[in-house]
Amino acid sequence: AFQAPVMKARTTAVQMFSEGDIGVLPPLGVYDPLGLIETRNMRRYEIMEIKHGRAAMLGFLHVIAIHAGLRLPGYLSPSAGLKFSDMPVDCFAALEATPTAGWLQIMIL
């Protein structure tokens, strides 16, 4: 009576990359000397690379904004009496000036 159509089996192997993709070079093809592409989920790694690249760009914009003099109003640590405007501009000096409770909050999240 009712029968589902028969699916044809694939005769070709599934390829992750095709000609014209980013990173596929004409003389070499996909450069993967250790053969890691077949053993890993490359789409996940591509998404993670994009995410981390965006986070790095936001961090760079933060450094530019701080050096340009943009500061948030209010207190970084009300109990220590530390305002955002009191934090040093230098990256390493700002790391040292951050209170321990602030570092603990960052590490917990």
Image (tube, rainbow, N blue to C red):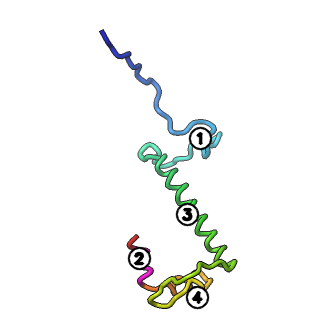
**Mark 1 or mark 4, which is nearer to you?**
4
Q: Earlier in the sequence, mark 4 or mark 2?
A: 4
Mark 1 or 3, which is nearer the eye?
Answer: 3
Q: Decide which of tag 1 and tag 4 comes sooner along the chain.
A: 1
Q: Position of residue 4 (x, y in %)?
A: 35, 16
Secondary structure beneath dot 3 equals helix
Q: Nearer the viewer, residue 105 or 83?
A: 83
Mark closest to the chain's N terminus, 2 or 3 = 3
Asked if residue 61 is positioned above or below residue 5 in the image, the reply reads: below
Pair 3/4: label in front: 4
Identify the amino acid type marked 4.
Asp
Q: Which residue is mark 4?
A: 86
Q: As drawn, which residue projects farthest toward the front? A: 74
Q: Mark 4 and mark 1 in contact (Cβ < 8 Å)?
A: no
Q: Residues within 10 Å of mark 4 (few under 14, many from 20)?
A: few
Q: Residue furthest top?
A: 1
* Residue type at numbered disc 1: Gly
Q: Position of residue 71 (x, y in %)?
A: 62, 79
Local SS, label 4: helix
Q: Residue at x 49, y 55 (%)?
A: 48
Q: Which mark is residue 105?
A: 2
Residue where numbered disc 3 is placed: 55
Which stretch is magenta? 101-107
| Residue at the extreme right of the image, as rendered | 68
Query: For the residue marked with disc 2, what is the amino acid?
Result: Gln
Cα separation between marks 4 and 2: 20 Å
- Report, in whole angstroms, how far the alpha carbon at label 1 lies from the one at label 4: 54 Å
Foreground tag (2 vs 3): 2
- For marks 3 and 4, the one nearer the N-term is 3
